[in-house]
Every structure is written in C-alpha cells, then in structure tokens.
Amino acid sequence: MDRLNFTLLIKEKFSQLSPGQKKVATYMVEHLEECAFKTAYQIGKKAEVSETTVIRLSYALGYEGFSDMLLSVQNQILHLNKLDYLNEKKEMTSADENSTFSKIIENEVNILRNLLEPSNIKEIAKAVEALMQADQVLIVGHRVSQIAASWFANTLSSIRGNVVNCSLTGDFYEKFCNLTDKSVVVAFSFPRYAKETLTIAECTKDNDVRLISVTDRLLSPIGRIADIVLTTEENVESGSNSIASVISLLNLVIAGMFEKDQKRIQIYQQKLEKIYSTYEVFIE
C-alpha cells in the first residue's frame, strides 16, 4: 500500500464506509496534521464517534490496524511538507535576498529538519524508552527554559502518571528526595544557561538517577553530563533558541510514547477524561 496516498484512499473507498466511519474519514482529511499524532480515542472524540469506529475505519481502508493507518498519515504529512519546503525555497530564492523574515523562517525550517538526523532519532528513541519505564519523572527548567519545561510536564502528565514539575520556588530537592534508581529527571537548559539547572543536573548524577537533558547542543554544560541528550540548534539569525524546534522535539518524544505504549496510554487518558468531565475541568 502506498502510504503517501491516505487522502486518495479515503476518496476511493468513501462510498463503502459506514456513516460513523465517514464522519471519522471526513474529520481526518480536514485535520490531517492535527490527527497525525493523536490516539484513536482522541480522534474519535473530535469526530464525535467511538474509539472502536476509528479503529474499524483503519481496517475498512485496508490497513493492518490503527497504528498502520496513523503511520500512513504521518508519511503523507512529511511528503507534503517536503514539497511545500522545496516550493517555498524556490520562491525565496527569487525574492529579495535581504528579507529578514524570509531568512529567519528558512532557518527555522532547517532547524526542524535537523531533528530527523540519525543521531537525534537515536537519542529520542532512548528518551522514549526511559520515560516509559520510569516509576517517576521529575521535570525542571529555569528562566528561559521554564516555559518549555512546563509545557512538557503538562503534556506528559496527560499520558502517564507520577510526573512532577518543579516550581519556581526552588522545591527540587524536596521532590528529588522521593526519587528512586528507576526514576528520571528531565532538565531543560538553553542559553543563557541557568546555574541552578546545572547544579540540579550534578545532584541527579551524584545520586545515580537517570538524567535526560533538553538543550541546544551536545556539549552544553548540562549536555556534557546527561545520560540522554535531546538537542535543537540555536537560531543563528535571532541569536536565541527556537521555541518551535523545542516543542517539535518534545512532540516527537510524546508521539514515540504513543506508538510504543498506545493501549496503556488510552486507558490512562480515558480515566483522566472521566475525571475532567465529572468535575467540568474544561469549558468544552
């Protein structure tokens, strides 16, 4: 099966689908990028059908299962993005070479593409495995790194339990005291590097707790001592790290966990959604 023709496959088999499957198919085609890394439960909720209907759609389209269908969607997104990138690059070349915005945008695209380097993929896979196996995950980030750390803590908490984000009040050591040799600390450190984060990283290593660093380069102060190093390049045009590339990197980690442990994550999210619904946590 040609994995790059997901939308064409939908079009070809649309008339053969059940009413519920048609709702899912329509939603996925209209929100292709949004669906690329979602679970069957999440897609079903958005399309207002059951999780089972989403899974049945994958079989109706001839896929081996939901994961196989999702991989096809992801490959199509990558293919479309590549074509868009080549077209945009061609247009940029003919445009004003001194355009500041064009240079910055093109640099952002290059930063994101570097995430697909084999060395990065290998470290991402190791991080996925470590985060899945950990009994507890402690996340820390100071100053400019705090926003990314908070985002990751919140997102990770939506797919697994025992995730703790250290607050800005400096409560790391009290929370660290509860960790075990099966725990993981995820430390975020981007220029200018906060001394507090390096001290925490050193404490983590001294106590034989596994350390994952999310940083701008392999040999940053925290990168040099971490067990697993997830890196994004510095944006040379602006002189600061690209928050877009950081979030994209973290999204790859989350997607990897979905792929590896989808069933357990779905059960966890269903329990979480029930609590959200019971106590009206969200407006919609």
Image (cartoon, rainbow, N blue to C red):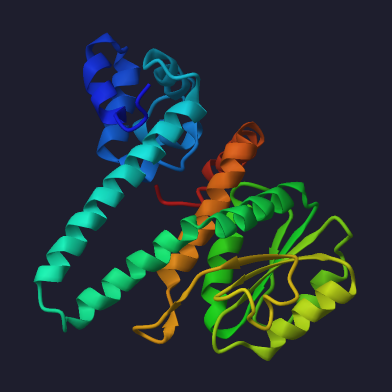
176 vs 245, left or right, is: right
Residue 121 left/right relative to 91:
right
Quarter where residue 95 is shown: bottom left
Foreground of the two, 124 or 91? 91
Image vertical order of residue 134 relative to residue 64, above or below? below
Task: Examine the rendered structure and indicate whether residue 100 appears above or below residue 28.
Answer: below
Indicate the quadrant containing the N terminus: top left, top right, bottom left or bottom right: top left
Q: Report which quarter residue 105 is drawn in.
A: bottom left
Tell me if 93 is positioned left or right of 230 in this view: left
Give the residue drawn at x 23%, y 56%: 86
Q: Position of residue 123 (x, y in %)?
A: 63, 57
Q: Is residue 211 visible?
A: yes
Q: Position of residue 132 (x, y in %)?
A: 71, 47
Which residue is at 70% across, 48% downward? 129
Q: Identify whether 190 is placed above or below 266.
A: below
Q: Position of residue 48 (x, y in %)?
A: 37, 30
* Percent of width and height locating residue 161: 70, 50
Q: What is the count of numbered marks?
A: 0
Residue 279 visible in the shown view: no
Residue lying at the far top of the rendered structure:
16
